[in-house]
Amino acid sequence: MRQKYLALLVLPFLAPVARSEVYLMAGQQARPLNGTFNNVPVLHSNQPEEVAGPGILVSTTFGDALAENGQRLSHATYTFNGEFGVHAHHKYHPSAQYVARYGTRRGQLTLAAIAINPGDRDVVLKFERGSVKNSFEAPYQANNLLGVIPQGHRPWNTGPGAATAAQMMRGTLDRKIPEAIRIPARSRTVIFSTDLPSNGIANALIKGRSDGPFQLAVVAAKMPMSDQEILNVLDSDRFAPGRTYLNRIDKIENKSVFSRVAGVAIGDTYQASVIHNLNDMPLHVPLTTTNRHNFGTGENQVNPLATRMLDSSLDNIGTYGVRYNIDMSLIGNGPYKLVLSHPSLPGRQFVSFRGSIGLKSDNGYEELHVGMRSGQSLVLKSLNLTPNMPMNIRLSLVYPADATPGHLLSVVPDTQLTMLRNQEEALEKARKQSAAIPMFVMEPPATAELKLAPRVAQPSPTKRMKQIPPPLLPPLAPPMLPIGGWPPSTPAMVDTNRPHTLIRNWLNR
């Protein structure tokens, strides 16, 4: 009967409970960063993310080209002059017909960026920093290097996106990109090209400056033997196949579906400053927000698109390749933790961030590799604050492709983080104990038995018991009590600690 009562304790609490997106800030409030983007235009080539064959991916020239569905799509027309950037991120998934005929070993494309000079004089492009990597050079490893790891001279990476972002953050230029190129009048020049392996990834991030007007394009070519064959793709008048969002244009426009970005975004750097007294309350600020995840601030840290393809997202929702510089001036007393979190989301857990973060303080500069799963809160740095002495910290990162935006940056007392860890451990212990104990419920007697059975001694109820699997406990850590009490504007939350405490007390009898 003990199992029966245990089931009665657990089952009422299997209904949905009030939950915070980030349990570290449960009962507390985030404040907006109120940062700003600069005005540097960046060509983003990320739609279609999965390319099925050769063709134009995005072009800022005038005119249009033919899509795979027979529709002619206008280019994302734009003319650059001065500072500029390029971000390209694509995967190659060859069509089933191609794989059946040739196999995946021969399924390889070349990803290339082209500079176009439509004017009557030469234009020179100088590149300040940049990196181009593919899956051969930086293998994609989704579940590798998780946690927070100090970074040495050679950056850790878990794929092309993490590798290029680390190099951009350090301000270096890799050997695939020339320091300068000259584009003759009325001509085109290939800036870079790299392999796009079958079922692999290629990523590029570049920052440069021109001394005159020019345009850009990104194409996928079928194993070209020369730059001219790459330029021929630009003249082919065809977009690369794989534009799966062309049948969902209305949903993109009403923001019920988020596509990828193919167009020119304004801004390659986001700058924000925060002055905060931790004696009043812990600090929580959103980092890389979305419309769905802004942690109650209503802040939308997304830079606008000056021009875009028809099947592109409406703005630069991923902010891939954007450099974030967050300056914090903190006042407090005692030990604190600088923490990065990602919301707990329904469904399967996934790796939400793989990349490098730089921290500059009065004690110097350090670089960290961070691999984070959804729902996690990871400590970036321990802080020891002296009363009446502000501590200044700058956090920098170049947001890597294949990360999932919607992160929270927090500075909380050690005691608050310890409370969260204790709750996580207690919940995991209760989950393991409940999974080890079978649950039983009584089968109802059959209707015929009620009508026909004579009044004789009935068999023991335990003979009619049927074993069922143990119920699932709530999958996420319960909300923790806030430091300093509930804010007046915060609604009361369900106390999810109580059922787990009752369970543990019962098991320990």
Image (spheres, rainbow, N blue to C red):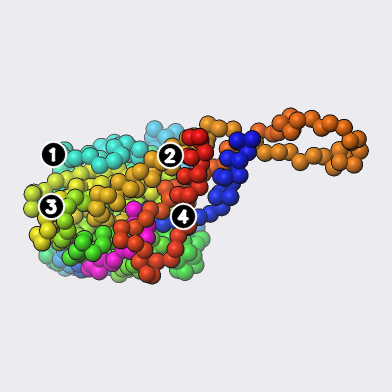
Label 2 sits on a secondary structure element that is helix
Amino acid at pointer 4: Asp
Q: Residues within 10 Å of mark 4 (few under 14, many from 20)?
A: some
Residue at (45%, 60%) from the top-left corner? 493
Report the residue marked by disc 1. Answer: 153
Say which mark, if any, is on residue 360.
3
How far, Cα to Cα, is label 3 from label 4? 39 Å
Residue at (21%, 57%) from the top-left corner? 323
Q: Earlier in the sequence, mark 3 or mark 2?
A: 3
- The answer to whether 247 appears left or right of 43 in the picture is right
Q: Earlier in the sequence, mark 1 or mark 2?
A: 1
Q: Is residue 166 magenta?
A: no
Q: Quadrant of residue 22?
A: bottom left
How far, Cα to Cα, is label 3 from label 1? 16 Å
Q: Residues within 10 Å of mark 3 (few under 14, many from 20)?
A: some
Q: Nearer the viewer, residue 60 or 454?
A: 454
How far, Cα to Cα, is label 1 from label 4? 47 Å
Amino acid at pointer 2: Glu
Q: Earlier in the sequence, mark 3 or mark 4?
A: 3
Q: Quadrant of residue 291?
A: bottom left
Amino acid at pointer 3: Lys
Report the residue marked by disc 2. Answer: 428
Region in magenta: 24-36
Q: Earlier in the sequence, mark 3 or mark 1?
A: 1
How far, Cα to Cα, is label 2 from label 4? 17 Å
How far, Cα to Cα, is label 3 from label 2? 36 Å
Q: Nearer the viewer, residue 296 or 38?
A: 296
Q: Residues within 10 Å of mark 2 (few under 14, many from 20)?
A: some
Report the residue marked by disc 4. Answer: 495
Any part of residue 272 in sight = yes
